[in-house]
Amino acid sequence: MHGRLLNLGVTTYQDAHDVQLQLHEARVANRIEDVLVLTEHFPIYTLGRTTRPEHVGTGWEGKSINGIALCISDRGGSVTYHGPGQIVGYPILALRQYCAGPKAYIRLLEEALIRSLAILGIKSARRLGTPGVWVKDHKIGAVGVRISRGVTRHGFALNVVNTLEPFSAVLPCGLVGCTVTSVAMETDRQVTLTGGREAVVRGFQEVFDLSLEEAFSMTDMGVYRMGTALQSCNLS
């Protein structure tokens, strides 16, 4: 199958969410092919649908932790951190073409990250009952999705060369005792974000049997701003 690859560079979480909504609407209407959106985010904590106050601590009421804003998200999972140097992937896919449902889809995303890390010389694996990808006892890739009208949104985040310190202020993914790692921490090789991005694209294409052609803008894919309301990133 054929799809498009859209690299947004560094974005705010809100702007990337807006892009997802527009692409999702276009994919539901069958106006575009499947798309893999890649981005990095400016520093932010995002709170998924299973987040509880104890996962976040005092930041829940203050709406920020150490000056980094918190944002409510409609994805699955609990709290996580996004920042520059981390590859975030938002697949916009007609799910029925790839698997039977959400659980199978999450396993496909995990497999794509496992293969991407193997390309980078890192052995990783799943952990039963905790979506995501691990290197031994340390989490390196998070997965959180939303599926609406048969089309996916949100997706995965892979720690490549990003700072890991912000994770220590929360319970990542709501897991007590969870520690995180990155590609840079797990290899003696010189790591670049470009190399990590290329590995992610290769791993994703292999698992989903999808040939991705790069798109250089939303309008390049025939998608124009459609006035979709932007989700508010606050705790009110």
Image (cartoon, rainbow, N blue to C red):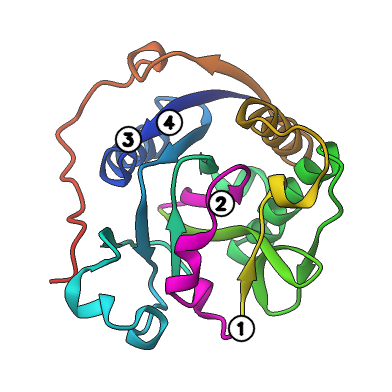
Q: How far, Cα to Cα, is label 3 from label 4?
A: 16 Å
Q: Which numbered disc flags the more N-terminal residue, 4 or 2?
A: 4
Q: In the image, which disc is placed on residue 209?
A: none
- Mark nearest the camera among 4 and 2 is 2
Q: Position of residue 32 (x, y in %)?
A: 44, 25
The secondary structure type at the circle numbered 4 is: loop
Name the residue type under label 1: Gly
Examine the rendered structure and indicate whether residue 102 appears above or below residue 127. Answer: above
Q: How far, Cα to Cα, is label 3 from label 1?
A: 34 Å
- Is residue 93 at all visible to an observer of this figure? no
The residue nearer to you, when weighing 64 against 205, is 64
- Mark nearest the camera among 4 and 1 is 1
- Residue 79 painted magenta: no
Which quadrant of the view contains residue 55?
A: bottom left
Q: Which quadrant of the rendered structure holds the N terminus?
A: top right
Label 1, on which residue? 177
Q: Which numbered disc flags the more N-terminal residue, 4 or 1?
A: 4
Taking 17 as reference, is 86 left or right?
Answer: right
Q: Residue at x 75, y 37 (%)?
A: 203
Q: In the image, which disc is placed on residue 156?
A: 2
Q: Which numbered disc flags the more N-terminal residue, 2 or 1?
A: 2
